[in-house]
């Protein structure tokens, strides 16, 4: 009887050992989980929409839009002019809904955009047509390899495409940006900063670049901590004053607070009362 019990016990123990070994073997041969790819941040694209003054004159507004990462940012930028939502109150899209971008090629700094036939359906009047063309030109010339822009429709420029929207045709293409010495067609925002980008960790010296359309080209800059403590202040001049639009650059030297958040403030001072106008606040980190 005892011998029988021992046999049963051995069989049970043997079964447990086999089960454990089989389980370990299964765990060993299980494939490792696939690595999770890092999430790519959205792509920041500069786009230009149209807007009318109260006198029905058209001009451009500059906006920065975030779109999903893409291998073709130029196409994404033009498609944002078709389907994107303007952020500036009163701004609107000129390119008609349903327009498709069939392709963009760049040869010797000229970007040629091939549109579907729907592009010819815009109806915004002569002033809107002129600025509508410029919205595409200014958007694409934000890319460093593009200096001029031309259009085709379904791969060609027949007479209908050459007439474009009726009042302003393609007879003078390729198009380029306006002469910077002339009154700027880009009126909003009055000031923008191209560097540093929002959220950048900054250190001294901090180089700042941007664009301004301000009285006598005078631009003021200030770096402050999150609680408003001033770290640095500087004054510079844009390359041209209003109504022209000029680029500006400045260098701020400061003692870092060590950590925390802050703001780069860029503005111009009213010649009447010295108040700070059209202030841009760029969030930064220390």
Image (spheres, rainbow, N blue to C red):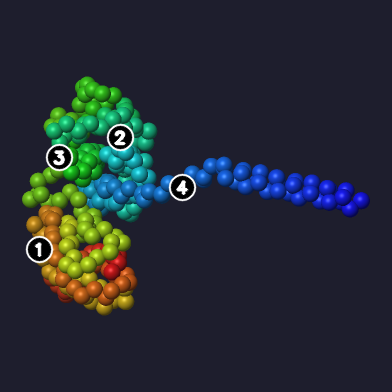
Which residue carries the number 4 mark?
Answer: 36
* Separation of marks 3 and 1 at Cα, in angstroms: 25 Å
Q: Secondary structure at mark 1?
A: strand
- Of badges 3 and 2, nearer the viewer stands 3
Residue placed under numbered mark 2 in the picture: 122
Q: Earlier in the sequence, mark 2 or mark 1?
A: 2
Q: Nearer the viewer, mark 3 or mark 4?
A: 4
Q: Residue 147 has which mark?
A: 3
Q: Earlier in the sequence, mark 4 or mark 2?
A: 4
Residue lying at 81% horizontally and 51% vertically, measured from the top left: 9
The C terminus - image quarter: bottom left
Element class at badge 4: loop
Q: 245 left or right of 124?
A: left
Label 3 to label 2: alpha-carbon separation: 25 Å
Q: Position of residue 1 (x, y in %)?
A: 92, 51
Whichever of callouts 3 and 4 sits on the residue coming sooner in the sequence is 4
Q: Nearer the viewer, mark 1 or mark 4?
A: 4
Res 196 quadrant in image = bottom left
The answer to whether the residues at label 2 and label 1 have Cβ atoms under 8 Å apart is no
Mark number, residue 55: none
| Foreground pick, 154 / 229 | 229
Secondary structure at badge 2 equals: loop
- The answer to whether the residues at label 3 and label 2 have Cβ atoms under 8 Å apart is no
Report which residue position mark 1 lands on. Answer: 237
Residue at image x 12%, y 69%? 235
Image coordinates for residue 29, horizontal then vertical, percent: 57, 42
Sooner in the amino-acid sequence: mark 3 or mark 2:
2
């Amino acid at each position: 009887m005892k011998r029988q019990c021992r046999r049963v016990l051995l069989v049970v123990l043997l079964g447990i050992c086999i089960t454990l070994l089989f389980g370990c073997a299964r765990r060993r041969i299980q494939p490792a989980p696939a690595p999770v790819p890092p999430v790519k941040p959205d792509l920041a694209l500069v786009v230009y929409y149209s807007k009318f003054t109260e006198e029905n004159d058209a001009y451009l507004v500059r906006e920065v839009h975030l779109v999903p990462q893409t291998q073709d940012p130029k196409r994404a930028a033009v498609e944002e002019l078709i389907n994107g939502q303007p952020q500036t109150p009163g701004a609107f899209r000129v390119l008609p809904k349903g327009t498709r971008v069939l392709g963009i090629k760049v040869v010797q700094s000229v970007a040629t955009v091939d549109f579907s036939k729907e592009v010819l359906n815009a109806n915004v009047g002569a002033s809107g047509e002129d600025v509508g063309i410029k919205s595409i030109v200014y958007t694409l010339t934000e890319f460093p390899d593009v200096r001029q822009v031309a259009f085709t429709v379904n791969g060609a420029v027949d007479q209908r495409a050459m007439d474009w929207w009726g009042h302003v045709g393609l007879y003078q293409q390729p198009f380029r940006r306006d002469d910077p010495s002339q009154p700027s067609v880009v009126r909003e925002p009055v000031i923008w900063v191209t560097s540093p980008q929002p959220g950048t960790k900054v250190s001294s010296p901090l180089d700042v670049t941007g664009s301004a359309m301000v009285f006598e080209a005078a631009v003021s800059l200030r770096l402050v901590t999150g609680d408003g403590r001033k770290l640095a202040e500087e004054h510079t001049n844009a390359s041209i004053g209003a109504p022209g639009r000029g680029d500006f650059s400045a260098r701020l030297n400061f003692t870092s607070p060590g950590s925390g958040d802050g703001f780069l403030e860029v503005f111009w001072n009213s010649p009447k009362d010295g108040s700070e106008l059209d202030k841009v606040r760029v969030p930064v980190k220390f």
